[in-house]
Amino acid sequence: MKYLHTMVRISDVEESLRFYCEGLGLQETRRFDNEKGRFTLIFLAPPGDENSEIELTHNWDEKGYGGGRNFGHLAYRVKDIYATCQHLMDMGYIINRPPRDGHMAFVRSPDNISIEILQEGDLEPIEPWVSMPNNGEW
């Protein structure tokens, strides 16, 4: 058995690509538009790791998804968790669980999918992250 990808339903292609590509640094690997089925599949992966794909499914006629159709979370390992979280905050995203310990953080996508960000290797906890509350806002 081999892991292939994780599928997430999205309601806004541009905002989702802004978050996953510009925010997290994923790259589009392929896209499939199905006119008859009225949906688009967009596959993204970290640069150089095309085996770790996420499939973004956009059903053209859907007007949004409630929290009941979501799932646990996606997880990505990064080289500098503080820089990644700061970049996402600078883009206007709230870090729901800041990387106080220098190891783990959580942020939500535009469609309210929880994304876990994990530090590659060890990183010393630093301020202001150590003192930041769970909603990422002061």
Image (tube, rainbow, N blue to C red):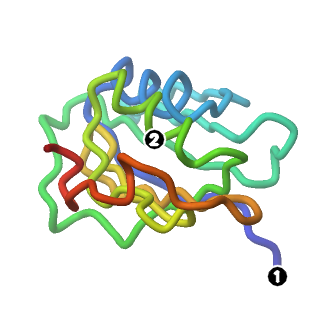
Q: Which residue: 27% across, 25% down? A: 92
Q: For numbered disc 2, what is the local secondary structure?
A: helix
Q: Which residue: 50% across, 34% down? A: 20
Q: Residues within 10 Å of mark 1 (few under 14, many from 20)?
A: few
Q: Which residue: 41% across, 32% down? A: 88
Question: What is the number of the mark on residue 118?
Answer: none
Decide: is 116 above or below 65.
below
Residue 98, picture quadrant: bottom left
Q: Residue lying furthest bottom in this view?
A: 1
Q: Give the image location of residue 135, x and y in percent.
A: 18, 54
Q: Give the image location of residue 89, x and y in percent.
A: 34, 31
Q: Nearer the viewer, residue 62 or 95?
A: 95
Residue 70, picture quadrant: bottom left
Residue 4, picture quadrant: bottom right
Say which amino acid is labelled 2: Cys
Q: Which residue is mark 1?
A: 1
The residue mark sitting in front, 1 or 2, is: 2
Q: Is residue 116 left or right of residue 70?
A: right
Decide: is 98 above or below 71.
above
Q: Nearer the viewer, residue 49 or 107?
A: 107
Q: Give the image location of residue 13, x and y in percent.
A: 37, 24
Say which amino acid is labelled 1: Met
Could you give the CA–CA distance between mark 1 and mark 2, rounded to whole angstroms? 33 Å
Mark 2 or mark 1, which is nearer the start of the sequence?
Answer: 1
Q: Nearer the viewer, residue 2 or 61?
A: 2
Q: Residues within 10 Å of mark 2 (few under 14, many from 20)?
A: many
Q: For numbered disc 1, what is the local secondary structure?
A: loop
Q: Is residue 52 left or right of residue 5?
A: right
Which quarter of the rendered picture does the C terminus lie within?
Answer: top left
Q: Which residue is mark 2?
A: 85
Decide: is 62 above or below 98.
above
Q: Nearer the viewer, residue 39 or 132?
A: 132
